[in-house]
Image (spheres, helix red, strand yellow):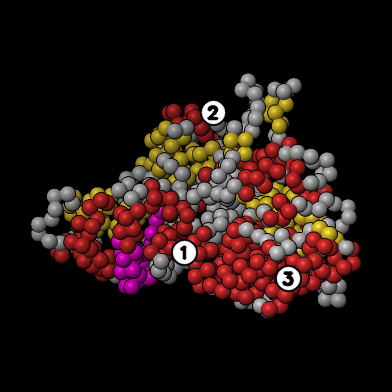
Amino acid sequence: MAHLPNRVHASGAARVFQKLFPDPQIRRRVCELLAASIEAAHEVDPANWGVTLGAGSVGLNVGRGAALSLAKNCLSALYDGRLLPENMPREVQLESGRLQTAPHAVRASFEAEKIGEFWPILEPSHLTFVADAARGFASRAPRSPTWRDAHSPAVTRFLSAELEREIPSPSYAPLGDAETSSPETAPEAALPELLESAMRARGLQFAPRHLAAFFTALSAKGLVILSGPSGVGKTALATAFASLLPHAGEVENSIRLSKSEVEAGRLPLPAPVLRYHALPNAGESRAATLICDGAAHAAKLVGDGAGGAHLLVRGAARKWLIAHQNATFCLETAWDDEAAKPAFELLEAPHRASASNHLFLPVRPDWRDEKPLLGYFNPLANRYEWTPFLRFLLQADAGFRAENGLAYFVILDEMNLARAEWYFADLLSILEAGRGVSGRARQPLRFDFDARATGELPPRELFLPPNLYFVGTINADESAQSLSPKVLDRAWVVDAPRPDFRAYAPQKSRTDFELNGAQKRRIAAQFTRAGRFAVTDQALVAAQLETHPVRREDLAALSDALEVSGAGFGFRVFDEILLFCALAAQNGLFGDENEAFDCAVALKIAPRFRGARGQVEAPLRALETWSDARRLPQSAEAARRLIAQLERDGFLP
């Protein structure tokens, strides 16, 4: 059994559809077919349908069961047999009499490559059946069908993006959340209010504009540097933000094989996997399958009558469990309304040892190469010396491969105590090389060690996953190193706001307040861009240029003005500013689009100025003039602040 895809993020559904229907034209036709079926069901009853997503299947469930099933290059659907033509093509496999509640229902299956030939013949009958099924077969549909908890928002989100139109979602909660929340952070609260309330609950006060800049910049690039004097909350902002997003311990179906249970041949099942199956009554059982160590074993699913269940195993499966007693695994299952037996799989999950989604690393002044981060091979001990960063990196990589939809954060505290170009050089070069279609870096990190090395070893190569985010904090004083243009060009630099002691009101953190799962997933979905993570999306850049053509002229004029003094910028900066604006329009954290553009220019252009007065004064005044002409107060203020520092000191460090 393959790993289950993420049922929330559109990227999980996209991977399944690409695997099931590799041909883009066929995949498009299948998406249109599925969307039409969803819309037909939704029009009749918005609460009586749902879509499920498996590792190798997609299903549309209406009323009492599956109305449409998609498998590898194959479609299977239910039709109103009374409306089917008499002379059906031989390639269409027909089966009737499956449903007692709808004796006229006929299931027909055919290969996906025939969709253009067969679907025009079958569509009217299928959509009629879907509408009847949504009505509940004369009100005989269950009040709460089992497929509700298995509904996958990822499918409808993928269809909306693929077909470029809004595909409806069922009227019941798409994430199946039952959590309650306080009025202050109700699920319907807008993202800005949600972030501010969560920060206040942690005793932190940040201006909405500062939160918006940090959130959008980190979402766009994955590398943000927080700059400012010591004690203004730079590190607190990074760690608090990481805590607002889901982490591994909140979403995984982990299970520990206790000695007493496995010796009795019992495998208790965690609640999250049980919601996908109809459980036997107390004392009753049904046939099931347990997959462990790559082999399938017969088992019995036994209900306890209180909403719980366990697997009863014998023989080789029991021996395997006993051999792995006290170990922790992840238990996964697939939802299939037509499966004769439910299947469960035990998966080893070494990356789940730590549930935290962030790693805090204080930078030391003696970091002169990449060894403090990536480790090194010790020839004397004939082993590889591991570091917390390397283990966390592999944890993030495993999370991306498992499609868990989580973001992982590395916080480099006081990162300019040492020269970032020394210890961060390899990572900077890889980030500069860009990312492939999957989101991974195009160039790998390479780990060198002797072929005869013993002990735990890292992989020879590792392509950075896009779900890994870096946040550095720097103190703007004389005790630290200045950042080079190479670092600044590859990061977003967010200046901490000046402390306003007149408006400062010390706050204690509130232990009675916490975001619920639905709210954390809302923030994560917006931040990770529905599972795409930190990838420069050229489609978003192109769309921004199409809807805001003046942005092209504005940035061209700015580059021309700065180029005169040798301070122009390239395509990377151009793309990142426009991507920032596109993401800001989606997250709604800024007051308007002009404010987002102003913020992007201030963050991306102003920190680039370094050097003596004769070198940087002219481009700074050009930036000030350009900003004033376009009524961009943040960019103009950034330029004036640097000009004042230049007049005072004669140079910018």
Which badge, 1 or 2, is on the more N-terminal residue?
A: 1
Q: CA distance from mark 3 to mark 1?
A: 51 Å
Task: Give the residue at mark 3.
Answer: 622
Residue 331 visible from this viewpoint: yes
Rendered residue at 32%/62% (across/down)? 32
Marks 3/1 in contact by CB < 8 Å: the verdict is no
Instruction: Looking at the picture, tell me which residue is in the foreground, 336 or 432.
Output: 432
> Any mark on residue 393, and which?
none
Q: CA distance from mark 3 to mark 2?
A: 71 Å
Marks 3/2 in contact by CB < 8 Å: the verdict is no
| 444 vs 505: above or below | above
Q: Which x, y percent locates residue 333?
A: 44, 46
Helix or strand or loop: what does disc 2 sit on?
helix
Q: Which residues are magenta?
A: 33-53
Q: Which x, y percent locates residue 377?
A: 70, 28
Q: What type is the residue that disc 3 sits on?
A: Ala
| 435 vs 522: above or below | above
Task: Give the residue at mark 2.
Answer: 323
Which badge, 3 or 2, is on the more N-terminal residue?
A: 2
Rendered residue at 39%/39% (across/down)? 289
Task: Give the residue at mark 1.
Answer: 174
Query: Is residue 498 toward the left or the right of residue 554 in the image?
Result: right
Query: Is residue 29 toward the left or the right of residue 216 in the image?
Result: left
User: For residue 642: magenta?
Assistant: no
Number of the front mark, 3 or 2: 3
User: For residue 42: magenta?
Assistant: yes
Q: CA distance from mark 1 to mark 2?
A: 40 Å
Count residues near mark 1 (Cα–Cα under 10 Å), then give few for <14, some for 14-19, many for 20+. Answer: some
Q: What type is the residue that disc 1 sits on?
A: Pro
